[in-house]
Image (cartoon, grey):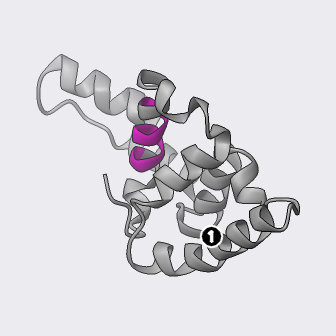
Amino acid sequence: MEFSGDKSQLEHFISACETKFLTQPSLFHEGGEPAKVLWASSFLSGVPKSWWQPIQKAYYTASENHMPLPREFQLFTNFAQSLRDLFGDPNLTKNSMTALESLAQTGTTAEYIVQFKALR
């Protein structure tokens, strides 16, 4: 579930993180949102990891000095939005619409439905 900056994999990465939080909430209960963010950020590599390192250092400094946490640590959704802003598809809606328009059933009905729902 590593995320290395491939924009086509970003939503899969975020969804996998959210699934982990929903299926094992006790792992993140005590640490709250920062625990979720720290866990998810441990799966960053390449350019995303380089982007993340100064933010993580700012988190440690802020928490040690009882200062406000960086925005990305306040909520997992903030972390996810920062990833989307930097590494997501800037034309996601347009590209999804184009893909929907050219979608054709080439396999089973179930496969077609899955592809349609993913693009929707």
Residue lying at 30% horizontally and 22% vertically, measured from the top left = 113
The residue where tag 1 is placed is: 56
Residue type of the residue flagged with mark 1: Gln
Q: Which segment did they paint magenta?
A: 12-19
Q: Is residue 18 magenta?
A: yes
Q: Main secondary structure of the magenta part?
A: helix
Q: Is residue 25 left or right of residue 86?
A: left
10 Å neighbourhood of mark 1: few (<14), some, or many (≥20)?
some
Residue 58 part of the magenta segment: no
Foreground residue among 76 and 108: 76
x%, y% of residue 50?
51, 81
Secondary structure state at the residue bearing disc 1? helix
Measuring from the top left, give residue 8's x and y in whole percent: 39, 57
Location of residue 72 (image quadrant): bottom right
Above or below, 48 against 71 in this view is below
Q: Residue at x 65, y 63 (%)?
A: 85
Looking at the rendering, which quadrant does residue 20 occupy?
top left
